[in-house]
Image (cartoon, grey):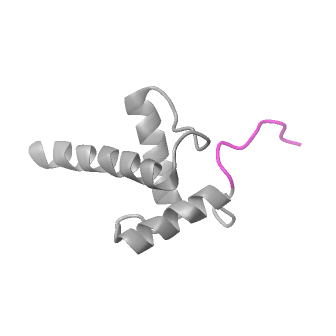
Amino acid sequence: MNTLPAERPPMAAPDSRIGQILEYCRQAGYHRYTAAEDIYRLRERYSGVMGRELDPHRVTVAEEVSALHAIDMMDKSHHEAFD
Protein backbone atom coordinates (compact mmCIF):
# COMPACT_ATOMS: atom_id res chain seq x y z
CA MET A 1 0.00 0.00 0.00
CA ASN A 2 1.36 3.41 -1.01
CA THR A 3 1.39 5.74 2.00
CA LEU A 4 2.72 8.79 0.20
CA PRO A 5 0.12 11.48 -0.53
CA ALA A 6 -0.72 12.03 -4.18
CA GLU A 7 0.73 15.23 -5.63
CA ARG A 8 -2.64 16.14 -7.09
CA PRO A 9 -6.14 14.69 -7.18
CA PRO A 10 -6.92 12.18 -9.93
CA MET A 11 -7.74 13.83 -13.24
CA ALA A 12 -11.15 12.16 -13.37
CA ALA A 13 -12.21 13.98 -10.20
CA PRO A 14 -10.61 17.43 -9.95
CA ASP A 15 -11.18 19.30 -6.70
CA SER A 16 -14.07 21.74 -6.53
CA ARG A 17 -11.72 24.75 -6.74
CA ILE A 18 -10.46 23.49 -10.10
CA GLY A 19 -14.05 23.18 -11.27
CA GLN A 20 -14.72 26.76 -10.18
CA ILE A 21 -11.60 27.97 -11.95
CA LEU A 22 -12.50 26.16 -15.18
CA GLU A 23 -16.04 27.53 -15.06
CA TYR A 24 -14.72 31.05 -14.48
CA CYS A 25 -12.31 30.65 -17.41
CA ARG A 26 -15.12 29.43 -19.66
CA GLN A 27 -17.38 32.36 -18.73
CA ALA A 28 -14.58 34.93 -18.97
CA GLY A 29 -13.40 33.71 -22.36
CA TYR A 30 -10.06 32.22 -21.32
CA HIS A 31 -10.20 29.49 -23.97
CA ARG A 32 -6.60 28.35 -23.37
CA TYR A 33 -7.63 26.71 -20.09
CA THR A 34 -10.17 23.95 -20.60
CA ALA A 35 -8.89 21.02 -18.53
CA ALA A 36 -7.84 20.45 -14.95
CA GLU A 37 -4.35 19.56 -16.20
CA ASP A 38 -4.01 23.11 -17.63
CA ILE A 39 -4.65 24.57 -14.18
CA TYR A 40 -2.36 22.12 -12.38
CA ARG A 41 0.43 22.92 -14.86
CA LEU A 42 0.00 26.66 -14.33
CA ARG A 43 -0.14 26.25 -10.54
CA GLU A 44 3.17 24.35 -10.64
CA ARG A 45 4.70 27.03 -12.86
CA TYR A 46 3.41 29.80 -10.58
CA SER A 47 4.96 28.07 -7.56
CA GLY A 48 8.29 27.77 -9.38
CA VAL A 49 8.37 31.43 -10.42
CA MET A 50 6.96 33.01 -7.29
CA GLY A 51 8.44 30.60 -4.76
CA ARG A 52 5.08 30.00 -3.11
CA GLU A 53 1.67 28.56 -3.90
CA LEU A 54 -1.54 30.53 -4.22
CA ASP A 55 -3.58 30.10 -1.05
CA PRO A 56 -7.22 29.42 -2.01
CA HIS A 57 -8.29 30.75 1.40
CA ARG A 58 -6.71 34.12 0.68
CA VAL A 59 -7.43 34.69 -3.02
CA THR A 60 -10.64 34.58 -5.00
CA VAL A 61 -11.11 32.40 -8.05
CA ALA A 62 -10.79 35.51 -10.23
CA GLU A 63 -7.52 36.51 -8.54
CA GLU A 64 -6.12 33.00 -8.99
CA VAL A 65 -7.09 32.93 -12.67
CA SER A 66 -5.51 36.35 -13.15
CA ALA A 67 -2.24 35.22 -11.53
CA LEU A 68 -2.13 31.97 -13.49
CA HIS A 69 -2.93 33.77 -16.75
CA ALA A 70 -0.13 36.29 -16.08
CA ILE A 71 2.37 33.45 -15.61
CA ASP A 72 1.12 31.78 -18.79
CA MET A 73 1.44 35.01 -20.82
CA MET A 74 4.89 35.66 -19.37
CA ASP A 75 6.00 32.20 -20.51
CA LYS A 76 4.37 32.68 -23.90
CA SER A 77 6.08 36.03 -24.53
CA HIS A 78 9.42 34.61 -23.36
CA HIS A 79 9.13 31.71 -25.82
CA GLU A 80 8.09 34.01 -28.67
CA ALA A 81 11.04 36.31 -27.98
CA PHE A 82 13.52 33.47 -28.38
CA ASP A 83 11.89 31.66 -31.32
Question: Does residue 83 appear anywhere in the picture?
Answer: no
Residue 38 in percent (x, y) is at 46, 58
Residue 17 is covered by the magenta coloring:
no
Nearer to me, 47 or 20:
20
Q: Residue at x 30, y 47 (%)?
A: 70
Residue 80 in percent (x, y) is at 14, 49
Q: Residue at x 48, y 44 (%)?
A: 43
Q: Is residue 32 left or right of residue 79?
A: right
Q: Residue at x 42, y 40 (%)?
A: 45
Q: Is residue 19 left or right of residue 28?
A: right
What are the residue bounds of the magenta stretch?
A: 1-9
Question: Which SS type dominates the magenta stretch?
Answer: loop
Q: Residue at x 43, y 49 (%)?
A: 63
Snapshot quadrant of residue 16: bottom right
Q: Is residue 4 above or below residue 32?
A: above
Question: Does residue 45 appear anywhere in the picture?
Answer: yes
Q: Is residue 31 above or below residue 51?
A: below
Q: Is residue 11 left or right of residue 78?
A: right
Please state the total of marks drawn on the protein image. 0
Residue 75 in percent (x, y) is at 26, 44
Residue 8 is covered by the magenta coloring:
yes
